[in-house]
Image (tube, helix red, strand yellow):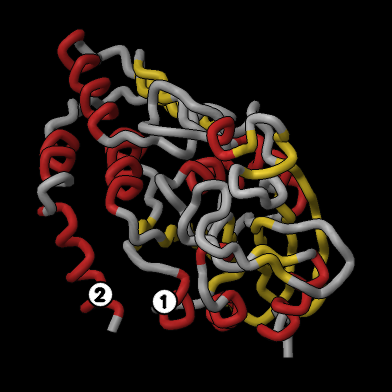
Amino acid sequence: MLDRIREERVKCIEWKNIKPIWKAINSLPKVDDIRVEIDSVISIYSDSFTEDDENIIYSTAKLMQPWRKGPFRVSKTFIDSEWRSFIKYELLKPHFNITNKIVGDIGCNNGYYLFRMLNEKPKKLVGFDPSPIPYCQFKFIDHFLKSGITYELLGVEHVEFYEHKFDTLFCLGVLYHRSDPIGSLKSLYRGLNSGGELILDTFMIDGDDEVSLTPKQRYSKIPNVYFIPTINALKNWCYRAGFEKLEVIGVSKTEPYEQRKTDWIDGESLEDFLDRDDNSRTVEGYPAPKRVYLKAKKIKK
């Protein structure tokens, strides 16, 4: 089943808007003296890049806007992504150990978190995301980095059918896009090895009641946000999916320092999603974006 889906989805490189990007990626300079620094900025350097190479790198990167996750640096080209993704990564890092483990990142976007995880020496890294532009961004960075990371144009619904199970799954900023969040959590649960761990990040609302906000149309100008739970409601979803030993490892309000407009995105960002007279509310009148970070275990049977 997955092979058929893979064959169908990789055809995206022939789409009218993707084909020029793919051609540009295949024309990127090839050099042997790549140096990589994996930190808050994922940086790639070479002494062999010519001025023409630098221009090709910059123009190729600009072709695949918007860059949501990052930042990245490829020689002289600094890609200042909309999200300063290192903030989330540094929040999560003390709470997982992926050394020598099989790890999946569900909804991996351009692979920023996967690239960061290389420092932790996992056994295997697999990213899942069906979106063509982030896939191209990953291929652009990995052209130089040659990470060995597997990128699948698949979604959360495919995790349980994957060729192998995972020791750790990350699902960051995905659950609120799913019309059946418990079903998605069940798929993640089934994709884990016994004793495996899920690191989850999703929108939340304050309150002790076991309830969820269901936006009428859009939330923070995002059309495909279905359910925003209280922490207690989210825990119940996880329990219903089979998880045990739940731990809330963080709660944070999204701030302009973390998400903002840059020259590397098209359109609006956080400042445009909030009520201009009351930044505690979205433009629709809902509570402003706030996230909960949760760790859940699949107990050994």
The image shows residue 200, relative to residue 140, as above or below, that is below
At mark 2, the secondary structure is helix
The quadrant of the picture occupied by the C terminus is: bottom right
Q: Quadrant of residue 8?
A: bottom left
Q: Position of residue 224 (x, y in %)?
A: 47, 61
Amino acid bearing label 1: His
- Number of marks in the image? 2
- Which residue position holds label 2? 5
Q: Is residue 104 visible in this depiction of the protein?
A: no
Q: Position of residue 271 (x, y in %)?
A: 58, 31
In contact (CB < 8 Å): disc 1 and disc 2: yes
Front residue of 291 and 187: 291
Give the mark, 1 or 2, whose residue is nearer the N terminus.
2
Q: Position of residue 115 (x, y in %)?
A: 48, 43
Q: Quadrant of residue 233?
A: bottom right
Q: Position of residue 88 (x, y in %)?
A: 65, 42
**Which residue is pictured at 27% across the width and 36% down the height?**
64
Q: Is residue 234 visible in this depiction of the protein?
A: yes
**Which residue is pictured at 82% across the width and 64% down the height?**
247
The quadrant of the picture occupied by the N terminus is: bottom left
- Which residue position holds label 1? 158
Label 1 and label 2: CA atoms lie apart by 10 Å
Circle 2 crowding by C-alpha within 10 Å: few under 14, some 14–19, many from 20: few
Amino acid bearing label 2: Ile
**Which residue is pictured at 77% across the width and 78% down the height?**
236
At mark 1, the secondary structure is helix
* Picture disc at residue 200: none
**Which residue is pictured at 68% across the width and 52% down the height?**
286
Circle 1 crowding by C-alpha within 10 Å: few under 14, some 14–19, many from 20: some
